[in-house]
Image: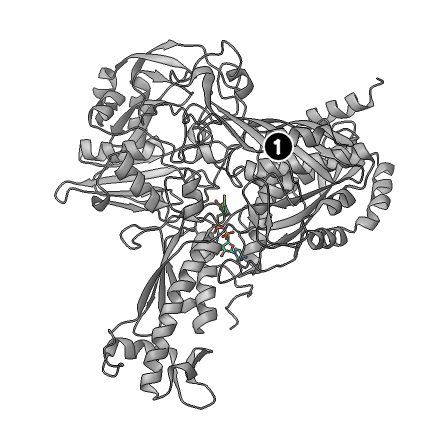
Amino acid sequence: MSDGIGARVKRKEDKRFITGKGKYTDDIRMENQAYAAFVRSPHAHAKVKGIDASAAEAMEGVVAVLTGAQLTGDGIGNLICGWAINSKDGSPMNMGPWSALATDRVRYVGDAVAVVIADSQKLARNAAEAVVVDYEELPAVAHADRALAKGAPQVHDNAPGNLIYDWGIGDDAATQAALKGSAHVTELHVTNNRLSPNPMEPRSAVATYDEAEDHYTLYTTSQNPHVARLVLSAFYNVAPEHKLRVIAPDVGGGFGSKIYIYPEEITCLWASMKTKRSVKWTSDRTEAFMTDAHGRDHITTAKMGFDKDGKITGFHVDTVANFGAYMSLFSSAVPTYLYATLLSGQYDIHNIYCNVRAVYTNTVPVDAYRGAGRPEACYLIERMMETAAREMGMDPAELRRRNFIQSFPHQTPVIMNYDSGDFPGNLDKALKAADIAGFPARKAEAAKRGKLRGIGYSCYIEACGIAPSAAVGSLGAGVGLWESAEVRVNPVGTIEILTGSHSHGQGHETTFAQIVSDRFGVPIDNVSIVHGDTDKVQMGMGTYGSRSGAVGMSAIVKAMDKVEAKVKKIAAHVLEASEDDIVIEGGEVKVAGTDRKMAWHEVGLAAYTAHNLPAGMEPGLKEGAFYDPVNFTFPAGAYIAEVEVDPDTGVTKIVQFTAADDFGTIINPNIVEGQVHGGVAQGIGQAILEQVVYDEGGQLLTGSYMDYAMPRADDVPFYTIEHNTTVCPNNPLGIKGCGEAGAIGAPPAVINAITDAIGTNDLQMPATPARVWAALNAARAPM
Ligand code: MCN
């Protein structure tokens, strides 16, 4: 089937997106709609001594000013982190209280203390400025290392020394011993810079309370509306689950930042009940920088040992992770089970130990951002490998080859069981496509132009397709991470797929339709995908951790299996044949080896007219399934960046970028390559441009695009993309996730290339011109 698996079908959803006809949360207009504006703390840390809302309340068009005291008084619960991580000594993590509207203390710039509800957005914002809050400023701490220092300001009373947990994985003693006996030990100190997620559409919520029905509806920019409904009802006590409908309509990107429940959604729902008005809030860009959960922000010291042949003997890692002022929904899992468990990389390492200390600071909460933990792991390992190769005078490709895992399944010492892959094959493909043999000539030619040309590798692996419920449950997750699907074949043969996955840029309306088309032979235009509405789809776990292909599609396959079984029974009965002889091919249901057949739509009709069904069969053609994966999937690849540095200015130009990825079976190469393009662009952004900066006192210095540099078209080169497929043995389509790979693999390739060009390993991200220039001159300075 031309629309089926492997076809480069154009994205069905793009017609409405590129003609401006997408329907986003901010496009929703409810009758009697009011607007919310939040009164936010200008201080990083302060006591709230009083709130005087009288001037705001007196302003025309103001419906209400609501405070944290009222919110907690109404029994609205604290926001929580849903993944319990214990410290090494068995003590539980220290979760500080987080009210949607702060009551007695604010802990970061942007922490909301009150909300104004008014007839227009402008009135609400003006009135919010008229609310007078009496703050008593407290000392603040913004950086993770300082937060751990003796005498640092305390962010939460129940987290002494700002420590949330002190966690470890692997064998400390064995790893230390292995390092001691090594022929060479490489030591690195790396920071993984704090990033802002920057989806194109800012967060938004429209909440409506229907008094007559005692029912709530929330339109929201969510990647997982069912989880939002569950958390809002079961944990935050905002509305009973069966009386709350959550709809995530078109969502313009999330990159992880829209997985969590934020204070604003809780407040809007509650405010709609209080005011009996629909309440809308849409973040502006400054609010987004201030209040969207940030990503990364690790400080790590690590040692990697090698024997005389370049085989890794041990890897010892000590990481401090900045969590910001509160624990966001999945924050605790990011530097632990999404980071430390990937520290074996693509290499056969027997001794690994990783210690992670998670700390509070007076900054916005930090949680998952594209890759979440895995970019941090990959960056560390791949910087290590390149640095070690240089120190030992080895070819960095050769050092990797000597250590690659060669056979599968492979159990690492840090939980993960890799199921498949071809790591040497990925690297070979990338080296060939990058024309590695021609690099010396290109370098020499660049030198004639006064430019320093460098090349850098990164061999990434990640665990996605998140995740087997039993496994994550045993590791502390508060939810199971299966997925659900329902396949509805209509009487005319068209098909609706209801899925618990949520597309917010990944093209599910196309790829999900492709697997249905492939199976039943119907054109993809006759397949529609229904998602993002808790009234339509019963339950789902949403989209993150590159799970919609491996987990979401597998649920669809399971439901299609059931549909196929019933279709065969109906056709066998009508065509008077054995069920075993029925085949579905090219949109027809046939008796194999004969000319007896039914068109696909005739089977649909037969199921609903029900005049001629097998005895005892229920009418209709609709089946559902839940799919719980048995393992993660392990996409892997080799990335090669080539850069030119201007030694006079430190400006880096990425001149060539080659990716060879293994994503298992590829459903739609266009979409997969688009995912790689986007991810690599974000990885390049992290490597050379992006960084959230707080000053020592916790003031946000990067609150706009004037200060926070996103990659633009001329910052990224044309990419060369190769595929090196090994089929995933653990799901029915053989898929591995592709949605985060680029953001994981790109940063170390770029930094390895820059450090190669300038001749020093001492460079941190983002490698801005100033940093590159300083590193280059430090490296050239006489000792
Ligand atoms: N696919 C495929 N063949 C494969 C694997 C995937 O054709 N072997 C297709 C899938 O069917 C899907 C797309 O590629 O259409 C991405 O699939 P997958 O890797 O399963 O990732 P998810 O759909 O679960 O998306 C989540 C992932 C993550 S975790 C982040 S972060 C991210 C990303 O996707 N955020 C994005 N890509 C994004 N793209 C856009 N435009 N916007 C975001 O916010």
Q: Most extreme residue toward the left, as rendered?
A: 212
Residue at 72% across / 28% down in the picture? Answer: 180
Q: Tag 1: residue type?
A: Leu
Inspect this view and state whether residue 78 appears.
yes
**Up-down: is 414 above or below 106?**
below
> In terms of image quadrants, where is residue 103?
top left
Residue 477 lies left or right of residue 66; in this view the side is right
Q: What percent of the width, then of the height, locates residue 70?
A: 22, 23
- Tally the numbered discs: 1
User: How is this picture coloured?
Assistant: one colour
**Residue 474: image x %, image y %?**
42, 41
* In-front residue for pair 622/678: 622
244 sits to left or right of 305 = left
Q: Secondary structure at mark 1?
A: loop
Q: Residue at x 44, y 58 (%)?
A: 553
* Residue 157 as seen in the image, left or right of residue 634: left
Q: From the viewer's side, name the closer residue of 336 and 503.
A: 336
Residue 716 is situated, as x and y percent measured from the top left of the image, at 65, 42
Crowd rating for badge 1 (residues with CA inside 10 Å; few <14, some 14–19, many 20+): some
Q: Quadrant of residue 594?
A: bottom left
Res. 13 in view: no
**Is 439 left, or right, of 502 in this rendering?**
right
Q: Position of residue 300 (x, y in %)?
A: 61, 27
Q: Quadrant of the C terminus?
A: top right
Query: Residue sitting at 82 percent across and 46 percent down?
Result: 439
Pointer 1: what residue? 689
